[in-house]
Amino acid sequence: MDKLVEIEEDLQYITVASRRNPKEHALIRVILSTLADIEEINNITKGDLEVKKSNGRYAYALNLRKGGKSRKSPIDETTYKILSKISKDYTKRQRIFDYTQEEVDEIFAKYSPSSKKYGMKDVKKGVMRILEDNLLNIPVRDVFNMDFWELSDFLSEFHPMFSGMWDLEDDDVARDYFLMLGKRHGISDYSEISEISGESVERIEKLMKRKWFQSYLE
């Protein structure tokens, strides 16, 4: 299997599996979408969530701070909504997260596929490799130095989190994910797939049968 495809599937696996715990899911989404480090993560408050508007456009943003410096990073709509939901009863200055580096690594490992246990450093490297594949002679370290709107456009086009490819809202994306569980991880029982994905057995069965029927017609 192509290494890049394997990385994308593993990060999708982690994202989907973490949905059973909203706060840990939010943490994972923030790291995957912004490549934030532990200090930036622990400084995030409800007041750092923002909807930016310019010339009829809008985008979701997260203000990240550390060591007296700050940066404004785009985030996808789903991540914005989850962060807003888990912090709805917080004050604007109240920090949303409070984790050590070791605790974050343990969270990623907990939701990793059995074939490989990821830590925070591993997933950030994975995201950088995915983005690097779409760059034209631009060092990947320079990506997050782009102008906000330029970066937002780039991530919307090339980051799987922003395009919805690491979520299961779309039926085709969900079906491909269920099939991947069987092909790569030997998980084909609908109840097991449901436990990992958080999706109902009814939806899984419907999409899996639909895939079989379409293949039969072809």
Image (cartoon, helix red, strand yellow):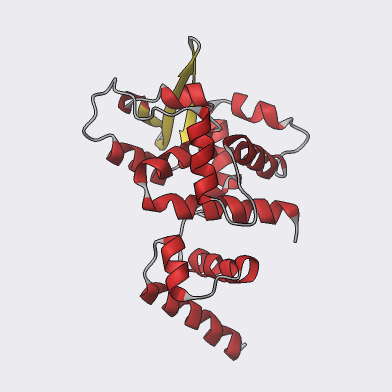
For the point 50% across and 50% down, the residue is 111
Location of residue 137 in the rendering, given as x and y in whole percent from the top left corner: 78, 34
Location of residue 75 in the rendering, given as x and y in whole percent from the top left corner: 46, 37
For the point 45% across and 27% down, the residue is 41
State the residue lying farthest toward the top. Answer: 68
Q: In the figure, is residue 195 to the left or right of 151? A: left
Location of residue 148 in the rendering, given as x and y in whole percent from the top left corner: 52, 28
In the picture, the quarter occupied by the N terminus is bottom right
In the depicted view, which residue is nearer to us: 71 or 43?
43
* Residue 115, quarter of the rendered image: bottom right
Q: Is residue 95 above or below residue 218?
A: above
* Residue 218, quarter of the rendered image: bottom right
In the depicted view, which residue is nearer to us: 189 or 156?
189
Q: In the figure, is residue 63 to the left or right of 138? A: left
State the residue lying farthest toward the bottom. Answer: 217
Location of residue 98 in the rendering, given as x and y in whole percent from the top left corner: 39, 27
For the point 62% across and 34% down, the residue is 121
In the depicted view, which residue is nearer to us: 207 or 199?
199
| Badge count | 0
Q: Is residue 80 above or below residue 91?
A: below
For the point 64% across and 30% down, the residue is 143
Q: In the figure, is residue 141 to the left or right of 199? A: right
State the residue lying farthest toward the left. Answer: 89
